[in-house]
Amino acid sequence: MHELLRRVAEVDPDRTAVVTHDGAWSYGRLLTASHRAASALTAPASFADGAPRRIGVVDFEAAEVVPLLAAASLVGAEVCLYPPVEPDEVTDLARRLDHQVLVTDRDDLQGAAATVLDVRTLLDADSGPVRAEPEDAARPHLVLTTGTTGVPRGVRHDWSRLLRGVRRVTPASEQRWLLAYGLHQFAGLQVLLHVLAAGATLVAPAPRRPREGLAAMRALGVTHASATPTYWRFLLAEARSDGLGLPPLEQVTMGGEAIPGPLLDDVHAAFPSASVSQVYAASEFGSTGSQRDSRPGLTTDVLDRGDDADVDMRILDGELWIRSRTGMLGYHGEPPVDPDAWRPTGDLVEVVDDRILFRGRSSEVINVGGVKVHPLPIEERVGAVPGVDVARVFARPNPMTGSVVALEVVAAPGHDRDALKASLKAACADLPPAARPRSIRFVDDVATAGGKIVRRQQ
């Protein structure tokens, strides 16, 4: 990753790399900061117990995180970016991931059972000699899963694999990509690497919520944006609510969740001049490519590509399985994975004509008295009711059946909730009895993690 920064900085050091509502940082400035951090990371005197090889980073400012990542990739130190969580959760993550050093811009982590360093001590350090790792040396990086289906897990990667997917990126200095994901997420890291490989600009509002993303689109000249379907639903709802309109985009990308056809239609209508892509990727197996034909799901061409393909997929008992030679090395604390082994993705799918359609996650299936109910089709049906901005279907405990289907709805402004509830019941009336929501609750927001709806039992 350091090489991506250096390549642009040597040609055009003043080119803008990161922009926020608070300022802009050039490629040259970030490269200088990365050199200082790399020097500090390899200087034993900087740390009480010698230079660390594994570091947790609790910082959400892109202008600070980017040079830290570049420095770590240069010297071979494994960095793990933490999500925005409370101090006790940071302490738990540090314990589970065996991090003895935390680098942060926060002042509430002194109780963590680790050495806590202010990020500026690295980025503002004296620029001394840098002991870079040999080109063929391991350059590890740890990515956390989003935790939508449980406790986040550490996924071990190597920078050589992570960078393989951006080798063919065409230079495009005029592009300005919105950072809608956290850089601690695999998807956010992919956006960052694409931007640096293109020599483009990363627009990084904070926090990474749809409201701030919409404001960045309007004020900071965003041309390209990648986000989850849930993020796009909320962003479109926000634009409808304030009535200020949407700026034109050149590219809209969606991934991380199943993408309903009606949402694709809404995005096309909202950004008529944009190219719309769907990406299927995960922290564990990396990216499998994109679909640009504006139809939900994947083409069946992705199945059974053969032994020579780096990434191959097949369907077993209604679940998508994958073999990836470009994905993770393994989970933290566990043995390495076999790159030629087939692994279940947890995504339940159905082949309809020439399309692989996503029906939900195996971990989200609701067991109602022995009947398996998939939340996603119910959400899609509810989401099509006029007056619904976002819907969440999940399991609620029940003493008789074990679980029942529960529904939370974010209503669009100006809609009568009693009338809307009647419409929701009517929309679900022809579902099998076990699939009909037994409770409907209106909320201001729904539970999300990493920009994705959380459907775990509540």
Image: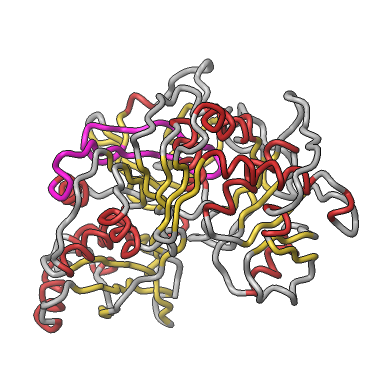
Give me the residue at 27% from left, 80% from top. Answer: 441
Residue 325 percent across, percent down from the top left: 58, 27
Residue 205 percent across, percent down from the top left: 41, 58
Give me the residue at 20% from left, 64% from top. Answer: 382
Report the front residue among 334 and 176.
176
Give me the residue at 25% from left, 73% from top. Answer: 410
Q: Is residue 216 above or below residue 261?
A: below
Q: In the figure, is residue 436 to the left or right of 36? A: left
Quadrant of the snapshot with the C terminus: bottom left
> Is residue 321 visible in this depiction of the protein?
no
Give me the residue at 45% from left, 22% from top. Answer: 168
**Magenta residues, start to end:** 269-297
Q: In the figure, is residue 213 to the left or right of 99? A: left
> Is 271 contained in the magenta span?
yes
> Is residue 446 visible in this depiction of the protein?
yes
Q: Is residue 205 above or below residue 402?
A: above
Residue 93 lies in quadrant: bottom right
Q: Is residue 386 above or below residue 318?
A: below
> Is 276 contained in the magenta span?
yes
Report the front residue among 370 and 262.
262
Number of numbered discs present?
A: 0
Residue 249 lies in quadrant: top left
Q: Is residue 85 above or below residue 289?
A: below
Residue 243 percent across, percent down from the top left: 13, 66
